[in-house]
Image (cartoon, helix red, strand yellow):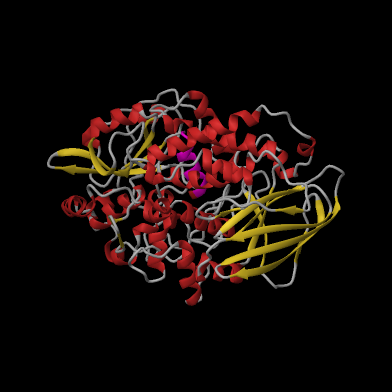
């Protein structure tokens, strides 16, 4: 689906919001919660405001996405560290069973979607771990373009004396966070300034969305820190062994993917053994690739394709310049140089050669012509990265172990998109706004996220219905065609005629890494080289680099068919996919 750097953005967007709630110094024990701050969106929480003021800098302040992310990651870890040594309070005694398992320390700061409450609508009720009888009702008061929403909560029947519940209240225009320790009636105020018609539509149609955090504040801080530490290699060229071990643990416990240690880590291939169209899959144990693997159900986080051009072998790929990779965008690198760079970057790499039948279909000349005329030099395909992955309403959004009942919700993704768009338009335009605009029929990326949803509502579409509309290969963004790593690989195969009669019926921009290597187009009949067998006995493919044995579930298992990869779920750990997805 994407390279290592694509998840930089999504990870950063999540941390942008989550870090703030985790480090709010004072929980709210009062009957009324209210705080105003001056932001492009309405922040009704002092800890959140402090975070944005001290840590976050917009993408436009940096020369590249990588500089933005590395600066942000450093800021988050530096800001969180002091709180890790803070003395734990009695509040920490209340922990959900789901949040208590130390074997699963990552992503515990993801909130659980509870309900939505619209102004003047009937109250909504739910049961929480602390206050087993909870309800909420909202009332809105409008003063010109300003709107104040009061959410009244009634919290009863606490499960213990010192328990508490921790909530996020949000619309696409603003948010607040509150901790509740006392039973009875509580009022939460959200104050929205200069609301547009689109903002008001979101409020009246979707209401205030209520989310609950499963972790207490000290535990959330620890989880935030542990999760951020998975991504430390983004700051370095090589991946330290200790970090690799953390990522291996993450893959095993969260994605069900177990990688064995290899004793032979370098299996050189003669260039004559590599043909145009051959697939090279990459996994870097750097937090980014493992997160992608978890979300996609893939054994790789990056994909590339080989092309012979003017008698020389090149590895062609879509990636970004980083601490461990020297070139930005869609590029071609001489094979031996690429291998050298891959070793320095701690890549694990598999080689999947095309089958004789597929190779006979693949027109190398047409593929090279397409690559040079349509792809080479384009920027990395951030615009549709999320949409290659989001095929279903909720069955692509990962769930946390061990019971996997807490999942990243589409409601929270929508809130996150709206808030990010108001705070940092440069990121939203890069990551999702242009793609959303296309889905409502606007070729000009001039509508904000909440405005897109207003237009979508006029067409009878909600958030999930809009986001699962299949991406189209023909869509052109403000900087050209948008292709992440596996999309480039698929488009190269497509240009070379590999899909035959289905060429116009397959959208490569809907592919993930798994979709690419699961195609039944690879050679499984030619005996592997002796060196490949010696390094990895019994593996059906040859791993040429890496300390850990890669696992490609579903490898070479699906024949191409029209509209494939457009409606595929990807839930860990089983990743069950219907045959027609």
Q: Nearer the viewer, residue 493 or 249?
A: 249
Residue in the image at 48% along x and 52% along y: 423
Task: Note whether 327 is above or below 575 in the view shown.
Answer: above
**SS majority, magenta:** helix
In the visual, does 452 lie left or right of 189?
left
Q: Is residue 232 left or right of residue 501?
A: right
Q: Which residues are magenta?
A: 286-295
Q: Is residue 288 one of those drawn in magenta?
A: yes
Q: Position of residue 44 (x, y in %)?
A: 62, 52
Residue 378 versus residue 285 in the image, above or below: below
**Residue 564 horizontal side relative to residue 23, left or right:** left
Q: Position of residue 181 (x, y in %)?
A: 80, 47
> Residue 531, can we see it?
no
Q: Is 213 one of the magenta-colored residues?
A: no
Residue lying at the far left of the rendered structure = 310
* Nearer to me, 350 or 55: 55
Q: Say which residue appears at 32% left-offset and 34% top-offset.
A: 325
The residue located at (78%, 53%) in the rendering is 31
**Residue 306 in view (yes/no):** yes
238, 278: nearer the viewer? 238
Q: Would you place residue 401 above or below residue 270 in this image? A: below
Looking at the image, the residue that sits furthest to the front is 143
Provide residue 440's location: percent of width, then percent of height: 41, 70
Q: Residue 514 at what x, y percent from top left?
A: 43, 49
């Amino acid at each position: 689906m994407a390279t290592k750097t694509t998840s930089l953005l999504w990870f950063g967007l999540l941390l942008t919001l989550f870090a703030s709630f985790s480090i709010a110094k004072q929980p709210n024990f009062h009957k009324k919660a209210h705080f105003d701050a001056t932001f492009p969106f309405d922040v009704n929480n002092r800890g959140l405001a402090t975070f944005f003021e001290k840590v976050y800098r917009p993408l436009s302040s940096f020369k590249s996405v990588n500089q933005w992310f590395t600066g942000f990651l450093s800021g988050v870890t530096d800001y969180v560290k002091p709180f890790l040594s803070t003395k734990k309070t009695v509040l920490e005694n209340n922990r959900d069973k789901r949040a208590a398992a130390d074997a699963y320390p990552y992503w515990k700061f993801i909130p659980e979607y509870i309900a939505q409450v619209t102004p003047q609508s009937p109250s909504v009720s739910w049961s929480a771990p602390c206050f087993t009888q909870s309800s909420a009702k909202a009332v809105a008061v409008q003063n010109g373009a300003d709107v104040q929403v009061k959410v009244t909560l009634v919290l009863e029947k606490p499960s213990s004396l010192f328990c508490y519940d921790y909530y996020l209240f949000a619309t696409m225009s603003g948010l607040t966070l509150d901790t509740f320790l006392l039973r009875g009636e509580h009022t939460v105020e959200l104050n929205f300034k200069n609301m547009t018609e689109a903002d008001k539509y979101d409020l009246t149609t979707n209401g205030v969305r209520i989310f609950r955090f499963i972790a207490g504040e000290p535990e959330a801080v620890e989880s935030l820190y542990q999760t951020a530490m998975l991504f430390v290699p983004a700051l370095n060229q090589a991946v330290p062994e200790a970090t690799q071990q953390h990522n291996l643990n993450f893959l095993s416990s969260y994605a069900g993917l177990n990688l064995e240690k290899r004793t032979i880590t370098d299996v050189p291939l003669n260039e004559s053994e590599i043909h145009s169209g051959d697939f090279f899959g990459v996994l870097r144990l750097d937090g980014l690739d493992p997160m992608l693997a978890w979300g996609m159900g893939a054994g790789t986080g990056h994909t590339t394709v080989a092309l012979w051009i003017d008698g020389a072998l090149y590895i062609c790929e879509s990636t970004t310049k980083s601490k461990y990779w020297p070139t930005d965008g869609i590029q071609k690198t001489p094979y031996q140089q690429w291998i050298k760079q891959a070793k320095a970057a701690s890549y694990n790499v598999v080689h999947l050669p095309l089958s004789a039948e597929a190779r006979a279909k693949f027109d190398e000349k047409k593929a090279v012509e397409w690559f040079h005329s349509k792809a080479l030099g384009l920027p990395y395909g951030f615009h549709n990265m999320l949409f290659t992955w989001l095929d279903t309403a909720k069955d692509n959004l990962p769930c946390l172990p061990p019971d996997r009942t807490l999942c990243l919700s589409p409601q929270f993704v929508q809130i996150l998109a709206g808030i990010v768009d108001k705070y940092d338009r440069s990121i939203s335009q890069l990551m999702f706004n242009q793609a959303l605009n296309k889905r409502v029929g606007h070729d000009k990326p001039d509508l904000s996220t909440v405005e897109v949803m207003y237009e979508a509502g006029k067409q009878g579409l909600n958030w999930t219905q809009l986001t699962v509309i299949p991406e189209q290969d023909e869509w052109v963004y403000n900087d050209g065609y948008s292709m992440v790593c596996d999309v480039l690989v698929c488009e190269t195969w497509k240009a070379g005629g590999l899909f035959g009669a289905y060429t116009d019926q397959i959208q490569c921009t809907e592919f993930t890494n798994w979709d690419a290597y699961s195609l039944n187009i690879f050679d499984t009949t030619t005996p592997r080289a002796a060196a490949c067998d010696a390094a990895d006995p019994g593996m059906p493919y040859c791993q040429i680099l890496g300390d850990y044995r890669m696992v490609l579930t579903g490898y070479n298992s699906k024949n191409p068919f029209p509209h494939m990869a457009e409606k595929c779920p990807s839930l860990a750990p089983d990743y069950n996919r219907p045959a027609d997805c």
